[in-house]
Amino acid sequence: MGRSPVSLSTLKLGRLKVVRRQLLQRYEHQPFVSCLAGLYGCQWRRYQRARAQPGECCCSRLECSSFGLLLATFFLTLVFLYFWSEAQNDYNDFDWFNFGTMGFWFPWSVVLLVVAAALFTYIALLLVLAVCLLSEGQRLYLHWSHKIGILVTLTFSVSATAVLSDVWSKEWKTLLLSFQVTAPFLHVGAVSIMTLLSWPIALHFFRMNKRVRQVAILGSFLAVLFALYLVPLGMYSPCIKEEGTLGPVPFLIGHRGAPMLAPENTRLSFQKAVEVGGDGLETDVTISYDGVPFLMHDGTLRRTTNVHEVFPNRTDTLAAMFTWAELEVLSAGAWFLQRDPFGTASGLDPEERAQVENQTVPTLKDFLDLAAQHSRMVIFDLRRPPQGHPYRDTWINRTLEVIHNESSINSSKVLWLPAYKRKLVQEFDPELQQTSGVRASIEELQEEHIVRLNLHYSSMSQDQISKYASVNISTNLYVISQPWLFSLAWCAGAQSVTTNALHLLRTLRKPIFLMSPHEYSVMWILTDIVSAIFITAVFIFHWWRERGLPFWSGARQAHENGLYSKFRTELNDVWSISSLSVRGEGRGLPTTPTLPTISEEPPV
């Protein structure tokens, strides 16, 4: 029984496809394109890929959507990675916040940074592969596994950004501050990326046969490019200063001592702060149930002592409800070795580790005497005792007693921060340096005899700092531990900063990213000019090649050696095989011509 015409046609078509695939594999090896297409879409073999024809879109609607999603994921992941990397100054606060919420210590901040960096690298590589494929004139096909990866990355970036914005919204102010330092360099990077993207954009611009698409792609590209070119006109950075206008380096105040080198709020921590060159010491004071002011930041003893071992039933009891006899038996250093909050405890030698383990809770008197011995100024937050505490109403008087009658410090070295009954305190001891934790008008500050402001670094403003300095009110910014943030405070004119990283900031001889307006102008204008020249050359090159114009006298036309000569050759080969097959069947010849043996047999 003979085969039906439909079956014969199907068989002929199948044979034709096999022959065409064999010829295409034999025709030309393209290891670079094979690698790109294999990594992007798992299309490792030549016949699996397709080159976009002139006037044809570079991908199907589904793949266009996938590419658009890839771009959106790239930018969202980049924003989150930049946001979180610039928030390193507050990683310690973030980890301790999670400790208080979850009840156990874990470096969540570093893990989040590593995950964000890994996902961004993955998305960036996919985007580079896509751009390279477009530059080679290939049609895009994204493998389904990568599509899942993009969705996972997008979900992570959006979720993490939303959660952090809700529970830690102040970090967005840090992000805005970072632009004052990094914006000039981000501008150079953005212009460089747009310059590189001009190659695939010019290629596909001249291949499009619809004027609307050409206008849309070129208009969008030029709009973004010109916006980037002009962005520096609106940039502001206090670190762009004329030579000779930079103020003196800010004084460094050790935040709870030197908490990167020793357990916070211990004698060893303050001793380390003095040794590395701290100009002042900062701490937090609580009053015990029997009236002894001692150093403790948290409301409870759980985080920085071994209270869970000594008083297991009082782990969550307020620190102020313990007597001094109970407090002085607690260890205030073992936790530092166990949790290593800054990653520095592992580098301590055995002698230093033993010294850390022997640290106990110090009193305010011990702290003031150490500062007086080394002639350091001090600043401290004073916690008011809770309801039912014997010193609930006399906490200010008890603290002043220690300063005047029990310690050896001079009152002029004390920056008095508590706002409670400030006028009475000022009358009692005029030598105390009255310090306010909130901004106010100059008239209000002078009325209360304020000589210093103690503000969070997120409220940094060069204009405000200069305004207060004009009436002899200095500004201290807390807590600054990253060199870029310290450089910004220095350029803004801050007189002092409170820091966890005394040993790092003390080594800075000048602000990083400091430059003169002339240097900055030369940098961004030169960047824009070089970019414009390169992009113009790229568009001229593609225009010249796509129209078949010779590049030199006697040269063959570009179309003959261009992207599409291969495409036409492939079609000619296929049509010749088709004709041969038809003639062969009519004359009783084999339907498939004999082909050279090839190393890789494609699937039928």
Image: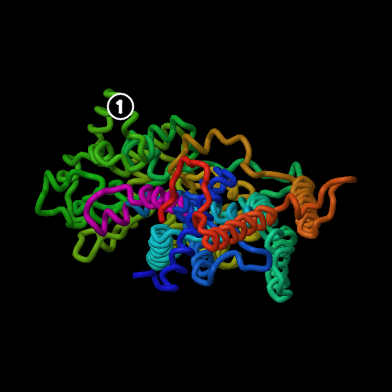
Residue at the limit of the structure toward the left, as seen here: 313
Q: Is residue 199 above or below residue 207?
A: above
Asked if residue 34 lies left or right of residue 57, the reply is left
Residue 135 or residue 333, whichever sits in front: 135
- The dominant secondary structure in magenta is helix
Residue 282 at x, y percent in the picture: 41, 46
Asked if residue 277 lies left or right of residue 524, the reply is left
Residue 419 at x, y percent in the picture: 42, 62
Residue 521 or residue 144, whichever sits in front: 144
Residue 456 or residue 134, whichever sits in front: 134
Residue 222 at x, y percent in the picture: 73, 65
Q: Who's the residue at 37% across and 69% down the image?
A: 2
Asked if the magenta segment contains residue 365, the reply would be: no
Residue at the limit of the structure toward the bottom, as seen here: 212
Q: Is residue 130 above or below residue 499?
A: below
Q: Who's the residue at 41% across and 37% down the image?
A: 371
In the rendered view of the protein, which quadrant contains the N terminus?
A: bottom left
Give neighbour class at mark 1: few <14, some 14-19, many 20+ (Cα, 10 Å): few
Residue matched to label 1? 352
Residue type at mark 1 is Glu
Residue 185 or residue 140, whichever sits in front: 140
Span colored in magenta: 96-123
Q: Who's the residue at 10% across and 50% down the image?
A: 312
Is label 1 in a helix, a strand or a loop?
helix
In the rendered view of the protein, which quadrant contains the C terminus?
A: bottom left
